[in-house]
Image: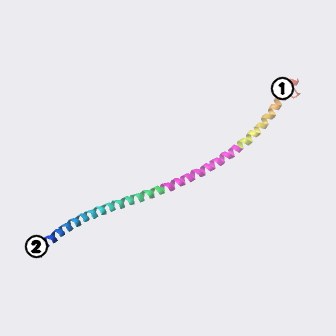
Amino acid sequence: MDVEKTIEFMLENQARFDARLGALTEAQSRNQQMIGQLAAVVGELAAVQQRAGERLEEENRRAQHAEQMLREDLSQVGAEVKAVSAEVKAVSGDVRALVKLFEHFIRGDGRGPAAM
């Protein structure tokens, strides 16, 4: 057995092993760096999602408030429409009476100048 060849073989194997170990170490370092970047991105996404959720809740509160105000306004408008409708009916009755009086006046049924 040749001791020199054995030592040379062992040194070559050690050199290949060291080269592969160096490459693996670099790859692991890159992976660790990417994992750190991904963790930062996930953290940012979580923060964005939190802010979006808060804004959505605020918009929902505003929409509910606007809906309530609209309901109140519609209720008030409905009440005003009913009041105006009642006034129109009352005025309509007065107009009918006035028209009848005018017709009698024009025809001369004894209550106006035509009867004179």
Q: Which residue appears farthest toward the bottom when viewing the image?
A: 1
Q: Residue 102 magenta-drawn?
A: no
Q: Secondary structure at mark 1?
A: helix
Residue at mark 2 to residue at mark 1: CA–CA distance: 146 Å
Q: Look at discs 2 and 1 and give the one toward the viewer.
A: 2
- Residue under the image location 83 percent in, 32 percent down: 100
Query: Residue 71: x percent and y percent?
Result: 62, 50
How busy is the neighbourhood of tag 1: few (under 14 within 10 Å), some, or many (20 plus)? Answer: some
The mark that comes first in sequence, 2 or 1, is: 2
Compare residues 64 and 2 and report the one nearer the observer: 2
Over which residues does the magenta segment extend? 55-82
- Residue under the image location 74 percent in, 42 percent down: 86
- Residue under the image location 18 percent in, 69 percent down: 13
Q: Quadrant of residue 93?
A: top right
Q: Quadrant of the C terminus?
A: top right
State whether residue 74 is above or below residue 12: above
Numbered label attached to residue 106: 1
In this picture, residue 100 sits left or right of residue 36? right
Residue beneath label 2, please? 4
Compare residues 113 and 29 and report the one nearer the observer: 29
- Residue under the image location 80 percent in, 34 percent down: 96
Q: Quadrant of the N terminus?
A: bottom left
Compare residues 102 and 69 and report the one nearer the observer: 69
In this picture, residue 65 sits left or right of residue 79? left
